[in-house]
Image: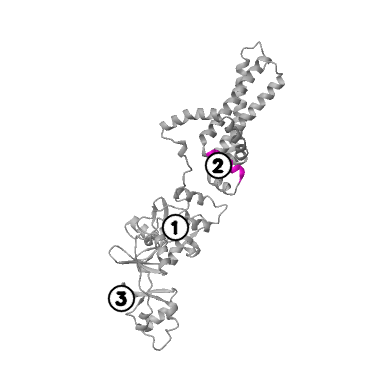
Amino acid sequence: MNDLSLGMLFGILAAMLLLSAFFSGSETALMALNRYRLRHLVKLKHKGAIKAHRLLQRPDSLLGMILLGNIFVNTAAASVVTIIAIRLYPDQESSVLIADGILILVTLIFSEATPKTYAAVKPETLAFPSAWVYVPLIKLFYPIIQFVNIFVNLLLRMFRVNIKTHSLESLSKDELKVIIAEAESIMPPRYQKMLMGILDLESATVEDIMTPRNEIVGIDLEAPIEEIVTQIKVSSHTRIPVYKKSIDRIIGFLHLRKVLTLINHDDFDKQLLISLLSKPIFIPDTTPVHSQMIKFKAEKIRIGLVVDEYGDVQGLVTMDDLLQEIVGEIITDENAVRKQVDGSYLVDANITIRELNRSLQWDLPTEGPKTLNGLIIEFMETIPEAGTSIKLYGYALEILKRDEMAVKLVKFLPESH
């Protein structure tokens, strides 16, 4: 190397620095690749993605090759710098130290920080082309890499890490929720909420989404026939439970399509009404939502009564309620949660905790009371007066309206959590 001119030596040094930048940047780029997007590109037959995916399946070989290349070029660069320093300043003993210091600074800026930062921001730009380079290099230096990896794998096994069984970890439900929540720029909010609803199906039970017992609208057979006919005509529901005095004494469900053409006949009476009823279906309150959807579909029914462990009716659930758990606000009352100019929210206290959490991306507890009203009453251990302000599990709110039995309207203060 002593026979080479200074121009050649500086050229070799520049080449070593570029190679060092390549090894450093490509390492960061390959490790920073989004593995799920990479899988998608592999399915699309992207050649660079296929090679990168294969390399990442054996990270020990890939990193061995990168480190081998980096060590070689950095050592070579240090040797070249030493020769240049001696050539330029042969009489100064400190010239080599100064040159090494300059090399460290140049390497840090141009061969480490800059390429690694670029690779972290745009990993695919560097990762896919570099994969084409690493595949033949790994084959060429395979014996050396494997020799080094023998000792590496032995050390890793001491920490109970087996490279051969290394695989891409699956996303948890909470991690997937974070990804969906952050996809706002490419996905309309209503679709985000639908996906959130699907993810919550596994943990939701029919008790979480049922219409409470006190809100069930039904037909009491003990009422006069005229009153029953009027109730049928003005009903906004297509299926109505029919009972005697109490919902606990249900007889069946009436489909209005079967009765609307008959109620104006002179011979229409309670016996004819009873003959049109379908058998009541009872659903345990702990039944998962997704299981009940399957049962409704298999048995071709759309409505059932929710009962507790003692057989007492707790509420009513329909196929629409189950679908609403997925599609959310598309069929729910948009006025249940209203954002104000100051950033606060006016919330109907009858809204379920699950729907409130899904609408505002909050984390109010869903175990226990199912509605906001129930959660407030449990927290306060009383029905608070209008004007009362509390901090409910980290969320500041004010009671705006109430009646003798329940809270009706609340205001969540801005930045209350």
Please name the residue that numbered disc 1 is placed on: 356
Q: Are there few (<14), some (14-19), or many (20+) residues within 10 Å of tag 2?
A: many
Quadrant hosting residue 68: top right
- Element carrying mark 3: loop
Mark 1 and mark 3: Cα distance apart in space: 34 Å
Q: Which mark is residue 53?
A: 2
* N-term-proximal mark, 2 vs 3: 2
Query: Amino acid under label 3?
Result: Lys
Q: Are marks 1 and 3 in contact (CB under 8 Å)?
A: no
Report if residue 370 lies within the magenta region. no
Task: Magenta stretch: give its range.
Answer: 46-56
Q: How would you classify the magenta stretch by its main secondary structure?
A: helix
Quadrant hosting residue 243: bottom left
Query: Amino acid under label 1?
Result: Leu
* N-term-proximal mark, 1 vs 3: 3
Please name the residue that numbered disc 3 is placed on: 245
Q: Position of residue 27 (x, y in %)?
A: 56, 35
- Element carrying mark 1: helix
Q: Position of residue 306 (x, y in %)?
A: 35, 66
